[in-house]
Image (cartoon, grey):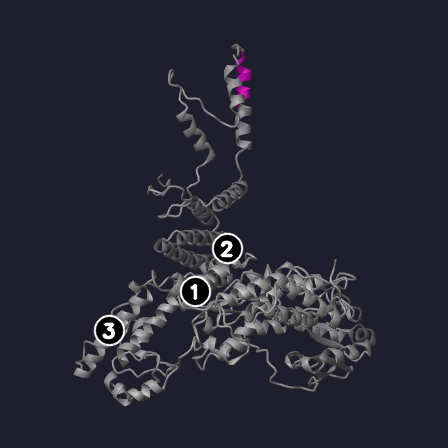
Amino acid sequence: MYCRKCGKEVGEGATFCQNCGTSTAIDKNVLIYLDSLKNKDAAGGETTVKTASKTAVKKSAEKKLSPVIFIIPAGVLLLLLAVGISIAVAVTISPKAKEKRMIKSAEKYTATQDYAKAVSTYETLIAAHPDNIEYYKALAGVYEKNSDLLLQVGNADAAADLYNKEFILLDDAFAATQDESINTERTELVSLLQVRGFRSDGTKIITAADFNEPSVDSSRSYSAEEEKDIALMTSIREAVVSTYFNTEVISAGEGLREGRRIAIDKLFDGNAGKVFLETYGASSFDDIRKSLSSEEALDAAQIYADVRGCTLSVYCGTLRVGESFEAATLSGGTYGDWAVTEAPVGFYTGGSLVLASKAAADAGKADGLKEIIEYVTLDSTENGIQYGIADASYQVSEESKPEMIEPENGGSGGTIELWSYSYELPNIVEEFCKKNPDFGYKVNVTVIPVEDGYQKQLDKAIKNGEADIYEVEMSFSHKYSQSSFAKYAIAYEDLGIDFSKSSEDSQTADYMLQAGTRYSDNKVVALGYQNTTGFFIYRRSIAKDVWGTDDPYIIKKKIGGGTGAWKPFVDAAEELKAKGYAVCSGTEDIQVPVLNSADTAWLIDKKLVIDTRREKLMGFTKQLYQNDYTNNTEMYSDAWYADMSGSGSRQVFGFFGDSRFIKDVLYKHCGNVPENDTSVAEAVGSEILMSENVCTPGILDGQDIFETIMTAGSNTKGINTSSYDNEINALWVKQVDELKYGRKTKVDAIEDFKKEVEEQLGFTPAE
């Protein structure tokens, strides 16, 4: 079989041409024609055409019509001709109709992967309507779809050519329309290229051919030492570039890291990653080498030397003899070696919801409650806190510990009582009062840690009308938004918030809306400001060693991302084990993903229900333990943290977590984090803000977290909570461990779990 576009031979059963990416599907009419040739009448040499309407065709052929002769007077004939001409003119297609027809054709070509015709049609539309920005964007989308298809069949060069055409198209689009949204398109394209393993300077894809030979100043002579510098730096440059762009073996980001390692090896006789260099002004590498003893070089472990000469020659193609070294960046860890992809199941890791008291609204504080609630949970403009969290201009923290928050010019309307289990929300409200100095209320802060009896004290305060705005953790939010205490909360819309418009404008995460909707009247009474949709965080270098790629899309397929099934993950664990790696640090790592991906709550109508997904945690945990797929660490132990930096008993492939986990845990324990990498954005409840921003922390080598979160969010549910999740989860995990270590059978473990829930919490199993 041969490709209908490029003519190259295509393997039997192939869906797409491996050379140009064209679909091998054949038009139905072509199939009919080919079939007709096969059925040629041997005797008469005529063709019998087999179509869906062959009966009608046969009847039409058999029917014999007698000729009828009409005599038309000349005058009538002229009249008919005139009318015919008029009709022909009248049915001429208007330009607008022609444009619509072309749009439909272009969309059809795109849907059927006939990209050549789609490109041609959009180019015609752009030529006719050069100021229509949508046609440029549609054509850019065609280039991306075609490029992705080419990558799937292994034709990276052809894909790169199309991506470069897209850059040119975006330049043309901006020149023709001056539309600022083109900058967003360009940013998204650059991010996509990073994920696909390409490197871009924002105007084109960079390849090894783009680098010039290091240049020297021909107007001067060089000393013997400087000549040695030139030779060594040229050698380094060649090693870095060749490794950096070896796409068959290594991705762009890993290539740069590997290239730097080669450079350090050349400079310090193999002591890569074990040398600490401060800014030296020496004129030759030998001087630098002599300034450090081998012992000092080895003792400075966990430091990663970044050579300025190497950097300049790789990025600029220019050699500067005698240039000093840049200050070193830290090493001896896993910083920059991580990527994220969708986990096998959709899950949330925790987070909080914010509610307002009906009693406080009835007491005349509704206007103040409305302003704070909107600022924290719904405002997706630069006036809301989520805007700052998403672009990293505001860092969620407990740095300040306010007791009474007083606006500079306001506060005369009374006091709002704010309750929380941490100082994160009070810090946000303090920021609100700074931005709104005329706010009419003071805010009195009460913070009680969960472990110190927060729920018990909060319940009392709510009943007594002493908690006006209060924050609850997702693990016990059900009680306050959907169960016994939901009646004390005021619906957001009853505060005067145009909720349908606000939630649509911000595109609030679905799981959060589900968890914050009161059952009794189907009104939203609680939302949060942080999005805790979970994902899988994995080591790029390990992925490359085991599967030859670190592409998040391919790793997602490898571990069963988004499928709802854990078998692909277990299969991947077996492959990792064969290469000497652990899939996770410990079996505890899978507990949150499994427990929080359940389809139903633990309690339904006050009866205990064991969801099938949660039940699978037992067998899954035992499988991981008995097959030695993990290092069997405990979460938050020293051994668990050591696995993040790569210094544990066995290198670990990945962890489950959310954006907070990356910022608050992984950044602190991965090692070799540069001092200047201090600003990390977090996921927010507003998906529109995440779509308009990027979160590309250095720890992920520039990958955008938000893209993965929005994809995983479609599979994340907030309908599986109950008022006693913390207590029931603890009892379940206890029995999971009993089965894991072989102390009980699964049947006995489940029966003991049911007994403990009934004895300690009073809930009997559903029939």
What's under tag 2, amino acid-wise? Ile
SS for dot 2: helix
SS for dot 1: helix
Task: Identify which residue, 550 or 391, lies in the foreground.
Answer: 550
Which contiguous range is marked in magenta?
Answer: 71-81
SS for dot 3: helix
> Of the numbered discs in the image, which one, if any, rests on residue 133?
2
> Of the numbered discs in the image, which one, if any, rests on residue 517?
none
**Measured Cα–Cα span from mark 1 to mark 3:** 38 Å
> Of the numbered discs in the image, which one, if any, rests on residue 576?
1
On whether residue 72 falls in the magenta region, the answer is yes
Helix, strand or loop: magenta stretch: helix
Name the image quarter holding the C terminus.
Answer: bottom right
- Count of labels shown? 3
**Measured Cα–Cα span from mark 2 to mark 3:** 46 Å
Whichever of callouts 2 and 1 sits on the residue coming sooner in the sequence is 2
Q: Is residue 502 visible?
A: no
